[in-house]
Amino acid sequence: MNDSFFYLKKKPLITIGITCFNARLTIKRALLSAINQSWRNKEIIIVNDCSDDNSVEIINNLIINQKNIKLINNKKNLGCSNSRNIIIDKAKGEFIAFFDDDDFSRDDRLLLQYKKIVSYEAIFKKKLVACYSSGKRIYPNGYIKYFDAVACNNSSIIGEMMSDFLLFNKKSKHHFYGNGTPTCSLMARRDLFYKVGLFDDKLSRQEDIDFAIRLGFKGGHFIGIPDRVLYQYYTEGKDKTQLKELNNNLLILKKNSKYLK
């Protein structure tokens, strides 16, 4: 599809959703990367999940006179799933892209993911499409690990093929599973989240895997862009412990026990 198609076509509103919890060292970088996206027709919704540091002060200083940015402060800590569901509920955009509070997205991320989605929809006449981005993960010691988005170099992964991969690592040798399905690199139409069901608020971690499993069961299409537009900065916190990861993995297996059996 010719690039001129994307510039002649009316550009829809895209919502950038950011959940924030005790991110005083990183939220400025994340928010500025959202503000500086080259896609002009955008809104930014930030949900502060009851941070007890000065994250809110930093955010408020950045969003003065920014009419397209909305800050929502949770009165108590609700967790990432609930906070993302608030973003989906409040979003006015036709598309939603999620940014994490400790990441940086290159200024052409929205444009590239939008182009990938609409071109895929035009060719294959499908609507349940989730698009992920490639990038690099940066560790405190300076080590950099590059990662590629799912299906960024060949055909899409469709339906239960993704569910089976996420549940018990079943792979097709003809498809590329890349970095999996992290929400921080996800962009999709807003109505996709309602067709699949919102993020499971019983999960404090791994909610992105659970969502992708359900999208797979709905016959969703998983695609990605090869451009390394997402820079993930490794951070630690009390909401990211290995025990939490394990317990939430076990909850996902329990939810899908009938299918697994």
Image (cartoon, helix red, strand yellow):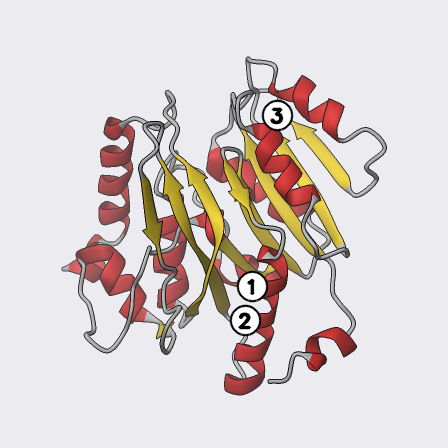
Left of 22 or right of it: where is 260?
A: left
Residue that badge 2 annotates: 116
The quadrant of the image that shows the C terminus is bottom left
The amino acid sitting under disc 2 is: Lys
- Residue name at image x 38 percent, y 33 percent: 234
Quadrant for the N terminus, please.
bottom right
Structural crowding at the residue carrying mark 1, measured as other residues with C-alpha within 10 Å and reported as few (<14), some (14–19) or many (≥20): many
- For residue 138, which numbered disc appears in the image? none
- Using the image, determine if residue 19 lies above or below residue 110: above
Pick the residue in front: 207 or 59: 59
Is mark 2 in CB contact (under 8 Å) with mark 1?
yes
Relative image position of residue 7 (x, y in whole percent): 74, 74
Residue at mark 3: 74
Residue 126: x percent and y percent? Answer: 52, 79
Residue at 31 percent across and 65 percent down: it is 162
Amino acid type at image mark 1: Gln
Q: CA distance from mark 3 to mark 2?
A: 34 Å
Amino acid on which disc 3 is placed: Asn
Q: Residue at x 38, y 74 (%)?
A: 156
Between the residue at mark 2 and the residue at mark 1, the CA separation in whole angstroms equals 5 Å
Tag 3's secondary structure? loop
The disc, 3 or 2, on the residue closer to the chain's N-terminal end is 3
Label disc, if present, on residue 113 of the rendered structure: 1
Q: Disc 1 to disc 3, how far (Cα)?
A: 30 Å
Tag nearer the camera, 1 or 3: 1
Numbered disc 1: secondary structure: helix
Q: Quadrant of residue 235?
A: top left
